[in-house]
Image (cartoon, rainbow, N blue to C red):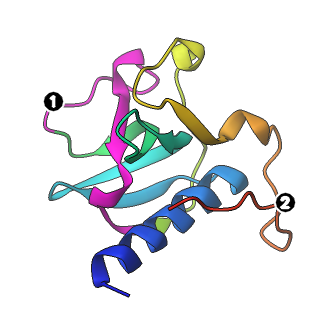
Amino acid sequence: MPASVRALEQAHAQVRAAMVHRRPIAAFYRGRRRLLCPHLLGWNKHRRLQVLCYQYGGDSESGLKPASASDNWRCLAVENLRQVELIDGPWQTAENHSRPQTCIEEVELDVDDFPEPVPPTQSPDPKSAKL
């Protein structure tokens, strides 16, 4: 399996785990370390795997607004995430999470499907990954 496919699968698995367990992640995206809470995972109209995240820390090309600001939403291509790791810390979001988003056309996983974090010792009913 090519390294790029393996890296995508690993990033995908970490993002899914973060959503199910409501844990923030730290990751590098386009060379910048970011602190993120992933909320929506799926494919765009070009069949590219995307994740809609609330970025609450780290670095950003466009800069970050204060905590809980509605401008800190980021739609990121999962294939560009590197060194994804689950971290300890509070789950963060903004009030406008329910606003219509356009970066994901086909949803694989929505954090709102897991109102309570699934304990790390349990596995949710896994949906088949469509990489």
* Secondary structure found at label 1: loop
- Tell me what residue is drawn at x 33 percent, y 43 percent: 76
Q: Is residue 55 left or right of residue 107?
A: left
Give the SS element for disc 2.
loop
Q: Earlier in the sequence, mark 1 or mark 2?
A: 1
The disc labelled 1 sits on which kind of residue?
A: Ser
Q: Which mark is residue 128?
A: none
Residue bearing mark 1: 62
Q: Residue at 56%, 35% (x, y): give it.
A: 106
Residue 79 sits in quarter: bottom left
Using the rendered view, name the quadrant where residue 114 is placed: top right
Q: Is residue 2 magenta?
A: no
Q: Quadrant of residue 17?
A: bottom right
Give the residue at mark 2: 125
Q: Which residues are magenta?
A: 61-84
Q: Residue at x 42, y 21 (%)?
A: 102
Q: Is residue 121 left or right of residue 71?
A: right
The reply to whether dot 1 and dot 2 touch (C-beta < 8 Å) is no
Q: Position of residue 60 (x, y in %)?
A: 20, 40
Where's the N terminus, which quadrant? bottom left
The image shows residue 32, relative to residue 73, as above or below, that is below
Taking 71 as reference, is 75 above or below it? below
How far across and how far down the image is residue 64, in percent?
A: 26, 30
Q: Amino acid at mark 2?
A: Asp
Nearest the viewer among 82 and 128 is: 128
- Would you say 26 lies left or right of 21 here? left
Q: Which of the pair 126/99 is nearer the observer?
A: 126
Task: Decide whether residue 70 is among the magenta residues.
Answer: yes
Residue at coordinates 82% horizontally, 67% vertically from top-left? 123
